[in-house]
Image: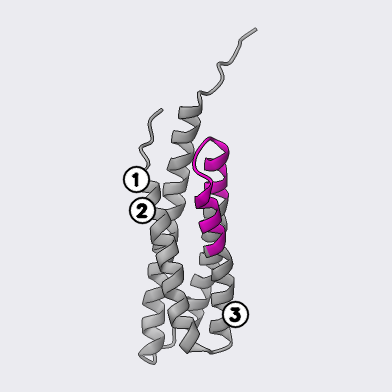
């Protein structure tokens, strides 16, 4: 009979912050894709399919970021990043709806809100020191 040692809270928190960091970086990469394809759209290029696919990817990685911050909070980390990640996630759907409606006067500033929230979470995640 073997006994497994319980995982110390510091080790759980260290592992969970790595997950937050990875999903946050992935979110920033998708945002960069969105900005690049938006720039193409503004220059009359046919990039609507690419921009739409990026929006779907943004929803997926945004959901993963919510889950990662939630798991980190359950492992003993801060809880406020879950709220910020969830707000950015919801804002992504609002942003997609506004863009689909063609309201660029709201869509463009909305993209900056998504960028600020995502970059803020990413910066916060990399300020955490993953010590196990």
Query: For the point 60% across and 11% down, which residue is it?
Result: 3
Quick check: 48 above or below 20?
below
Q: Identify which residue, 26 or 67, lies in the foreground.
A: 67
Quick check: 17 above or below 95?
above
Kindly state the secondary structure of the residue where label 1 is placed.
Answer: helix
Q: Residues within 10 Å of mark 1 (few under 14, many from 20)?
A: few
Query: For the point 49% across and 84% down, which residue is it?
Result: 106
Circle nearer the viewer, 3 or 2? 2
Judge left or right: residue 32 versus residue 51: left
Q: Identify which residue, 32 or 122, lies in the foreground.
A: 122
Task: Please tell me whether residue 112 belongs to the stretch shown in magenta.
Answer: no
Kindly state the secondary structure of the residue where label 2 is placed.
Answer: helix
Q: Residue 127 shows which numbered tag?
A: 1
Give percent across and percent down for residue 31: 42, 67
Judge left or right: residue 14 versus residue 86: left
Residue position for label 3: 97
Residue position for label 2: 123
Q: Earlier in the sequence, mark 3 or mark 2?
A: 3
* Quadrant in the picture for the C terminus: top left
**Spatial CA span between label 3 and label 2:** 28 Å
| Magenta range | 67-87
Kindly state the secondary structure of the residue where label 3 is placed.
Answer: helix
Give percent across and percent down for residue 96: 56, 77
Residue situated furthest right in the rendering = 1
The answer to whether mark 3 and mark 2 are in CB contact below 8 A is: no
The answer to whether mark 2 and mark 1 are in CB contact below 8 A is: yes
Q: Identify which residue, 45 or 19, lies in the foreground.
A: 19
């Amino acid at each position: 009979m073997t006994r497994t040692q319980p995982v110390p809270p510091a080790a759980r928190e260290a592992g969970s912050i790595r997950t937050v960091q990875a999903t946050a970086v992935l979110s920033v990469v998708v945002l960069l894709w969105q900005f690049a394809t938006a720039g193409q759209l503004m220059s009359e290029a046919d990039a609507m399919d690419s921009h739409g696919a990026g929006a779907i990817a943004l929803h997926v990685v945004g959901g993963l970021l919510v889950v990662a911050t939630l798991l980190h909070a359950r492992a003993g980390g801060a809880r406020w990043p879950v709220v910020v990640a969830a707000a950015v996630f919801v804002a992504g759907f609002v942003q997609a709806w506004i863009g689909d409606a063609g309201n660029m006067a709201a869509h463009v500033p909305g993209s900056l809100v998504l960028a600020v929230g995502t970059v803020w979470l990413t910066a916060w995640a990399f300020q955490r020191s993953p010590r196990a």
